[in-house]
Image (spheres, grey):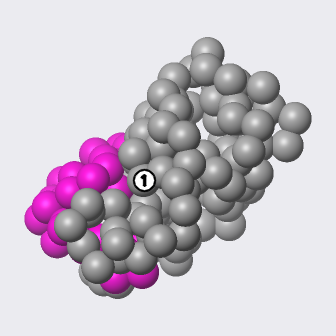
Amino acid sequence: MLKPAASKTFEEYAQQIFIPYMSTKLQTVSRLDLVWDTYLADSLKGSTRAKRGQGVRRRVVAAAAIPGNWQNFLRVDSNKTELFRFLSAALMEWFDQEDKQLVITDGEAVLSKPLLPDLTSLAPCNHEEADSRMLLTQTSMDTMQYSSGL
């Protein structure tokens, strides 16, 4: 995850760090797939994450302050889930390139802009790890003949 640097709020983080980074990635591809992990409470991975330590639960909204300890913030699965949703929404709102395709996982759902005519090969997706989810998006890109942006 990109570090917040001097960002004071989640809105600043999205606008000054995350979106510019994604914008540079979009310059070299025709389709960008943003694939997030999902965090299932009763999974083996969940128990492994719990052993790494606890952080503090924070709400991720535009005006909320960036936590002082970013690593502790990212230890809480619900913090990451909210952060991913917040960043996805910010990126979808910003994205307006008609010659490009943006595809983002959102839990088991998939968002796309412009809207893909058929998302059945991508959603619903219940894979926990982004690694396995990326295989599905790669297959989708191969089918639609996009240049890779994973």
Which residue was labeled with disc 1?
77
| Residue 110 appears anywhere in the view | no
x, y percent for residue 3: 76, 51
Q: Nearer the viewer, residue 3 or 99?
A: 3
Q: Quadrant of the N terminus?
A: bottom right
Q: Is mark 1 on a helix, strand or loop?
A: helix
Residue 124 lies within the magenta run: yes
x, y percent for residue 43: 24, 73
x, y percent for residue 143: 28, 80
Residue plotted at (27% across, 53% down): 107
Q: Nearer the viewer, residue 85 or 60?
A: 60
Span shown in magenta: 105-132
Residue plotted at (55% across, 62% down): 53
Above or below, comparing residue 122 to residue 61 in the picture: below
Q: Nearer the viewer, residue 19 or 41?
A: 41
Residue plotted at (52% across, 32% down): 58
Residue plotted at (80% across, 32% down): 7
Residue 64 lies within the magenta run: no
x, y percent for residue 25: 67, 61
Amino acid type of the residue tagged 1 in the rendering: Asp
| Residue 132 appears anywhere in the view | yes
Query: Going by the picture, which residue comes out furthest to the right?
Result: 6
Query: Going by the picture, which residue comes out furthest to the top?
Result: 63
Image side of residue 121 versus residue 62, left or right = left
Number of callouts: 1
Image side of residue 121 versus residue 31, left or right = left
Q: Is the magenta stretch mostly helix, strand or loop?
A: loop
